[in-house]
Image (cartoon, grey):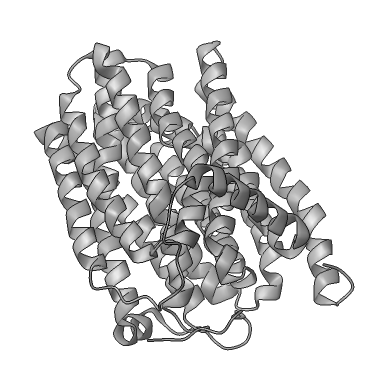
């Protein structure tokens, strides 16, 4: 079992390769295997929900509701989820989350007409709320099952897997939904959660002291969440990195919503396949970005500048999409570019948070990172839906959100990069 240092440093030793990591680290292999299976089902599920809502209602607002129910519950549940990740056995927490989600997704089989939309939203919210407990536990476990020179590679591997499964699941999921209907997809997704739980059963995590009692978990949890926020305030080097995903989300949330509508309009005769194609391009980009960033930017001291540049580049890609909105394959290429930048931003910022945070607070810090990002993305989706409902065209909405994202990236960079340089020089926190 690898025994990581208290605070690994990305720049201290060269990262191992993907092949070496998978050959030598059994626990990363298990976590990776479960991730592959469950993500494949999740992306099928996501496209099925988009199709189901569009078929039942034909409403852009109703589709926006699906995006919000996949983000807001994550934001609301993340603080308590982070506490649970710090107080409970993380492996058991992940297995329990998989089993509960397998049951929840079968509930989508009961959604049959527009009158059942409330049930769809409720189940989607429940699925995401349970997922909120899985993610900080997984991210908090990763530094414990890797060596210092494996952590960045492991993060890039899991991010690339998310991206590849998005690309494969979206590309394959669209035709599957169109050919076999949504019910088949929901059964498939439930099965993938069970397989993921099977992988995690054999995961070995170093022992740690966990809470024996969970009485008053919400009340005590909220107190500990306050401690987590205080941790960020008292450690500026951690706090400023915890803001960068939210910075991307200022425009990024609404742009994800717009991407589904754009795919449905660019390929009107392709059904769900049109949405799937653009989401597959998104997956390809988010897969390439972390791999390229890992190769090009090995010195962690440069990462804050890279993070700011990635936010700006992602917005620039979507500005190009707005200008070339009728050129299908140009749009697809720009989606790849925009999400290569956002994917690099995600992995580098997550790695910095893991490295800079003490283990006892890691789950809460990661969940706070998610909380900030999802709240901002939810607000962005809500704003985009309101503009579309008011009659503003899809292309102007995309252009406006892209410019907003670029401005946010510049502002974060101007505020953070000088502080990071002072910290590196020993003159700042």
Residue 230: tell me if it is visible.
Answer: yes
What is the x, y in percent for residue 114?
Answer: 26, 13
Q: Nearer the viewer, residue 220 or 237?
A: 220
Name the residue at 61% across, 74% down.
Answer: 297
Which image quadrant: the N terminus? bottom left
Q: Quadrant of residue 287?
A: bottom left
Name the residue at 38% across, 19% down.
Answer: 62
Name the residue at 53% across, 73% down.
Answer: 294
Residue 39: tell me if it is visible.
Answer: no
Q: Nearer the viewer, residue 349 or 130?
A: 130
What is the x, y in percent for residue 226?
Answer: 66, 49
Establish if 11 lies above or below 172: below
Apparent side of residue 232 relative to residue 146 in the rendered image (left or right): right
Establish if 89 lies above or below 398: below
Q: Quadrant of residue 195?
A: bottom left
Establish if 326 lies above or below 101: above
What is the x, y in percent for residue 92?
Answer: 31, 62
Q: Nearer the viewer, residue 405 or 117?
A: 117
What is the x, y in percent for residue 141?
Answer: 43, 69
Which image quadrant: the C terminus? bottom right
Name the residue at 17% across, 36% down.
Answer: 106
Apparent side of residue 294 relative to residue 45 in the rendered image (left or right): right
Total marks in image: 0
């Amino acid at each position: 079992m690898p025994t990581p240092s208290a605070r690994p440093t990305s720049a201290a030793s060269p990262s191992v390769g993907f092949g070496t990591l998978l050959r030598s680290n059994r626990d990363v292999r298990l976590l990776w295997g479960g991730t592959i299976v469950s993500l494949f089902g999740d992306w099928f599920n996501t496209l099925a929900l988009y199709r189901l809502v569009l078929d039942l209602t034909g409403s852009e607002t109703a589709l926006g509701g699906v995006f919000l129910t996949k983000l807001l519950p994550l934001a609301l549940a993340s603080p308590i989820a982070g506490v649970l990740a710090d107080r409970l056995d993380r492996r058991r927490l992940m297995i329990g989350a998989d089993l509960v989600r397998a049951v929840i997704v079968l509930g989508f089989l009961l959604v049959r007409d527009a009158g059942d939309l409330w049930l769809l939203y409720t189940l989607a919210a429940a699925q995401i709320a349970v997922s909120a407990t899985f993610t900080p536990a997984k991210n908090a476990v990763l530094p414990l099952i890797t060596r210092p020179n494996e952590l960045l590679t492991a993060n890039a591997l899991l991010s690339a897997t998310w991206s590849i499964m998005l690309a494969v699941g979206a590309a394959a999921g669209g035709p599957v939904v169109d050919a076999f209907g949504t019910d088949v997809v929901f059964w498939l997704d439930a099965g993938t959660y069970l397989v993921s739980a099977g992988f995690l059963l054999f995961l070995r995590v170093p022992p740690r002291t966990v809470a024996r009692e969970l009485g008053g978990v919400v009340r005590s949890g909220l107190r500990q969440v306050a401690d987590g926020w205080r941790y960020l305030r008292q450690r500026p080097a951690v706090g400023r990195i915890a803001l960068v995903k939210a910075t991307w989300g200022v425009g990024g949330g609404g742009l994800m919503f717009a991407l589904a509508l754009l795919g449905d309009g660019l390929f009107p005769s392709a059904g769900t396949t049109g949405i799937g194609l653009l989401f597959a391009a998104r997956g390809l980009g988010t897969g390439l970005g972390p791999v390229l960033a890992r190769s090009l930017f090995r010195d962690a001291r440069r990462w804050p500048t890279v993070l700011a540049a990635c936010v700006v580049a992602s917005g620039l890609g979507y500005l190009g999409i707005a200008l070339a909105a009728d050129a299908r394959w140009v749009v697809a290429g720009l989606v790849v570019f925009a999400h290569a930048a956002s994917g690099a931003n995600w992995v580098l910022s997550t790695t910095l948070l893991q490295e800079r945070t003490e283990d006892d607070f890691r789950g809460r810090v990661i969940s706070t990172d998610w909380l900030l990002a999802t709240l901002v993305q939810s607000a962005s989706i809500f704003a985009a839906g309101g503009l579309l409902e008011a009659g503003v065209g899809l292309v102007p909405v995309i252009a406006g959100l892209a410019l907003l994202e670029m401005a946010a990236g510049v502002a974060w960079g101007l505020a953070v990069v000088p502080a990071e340089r002072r910290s590196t020089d020993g003159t700042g926190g």
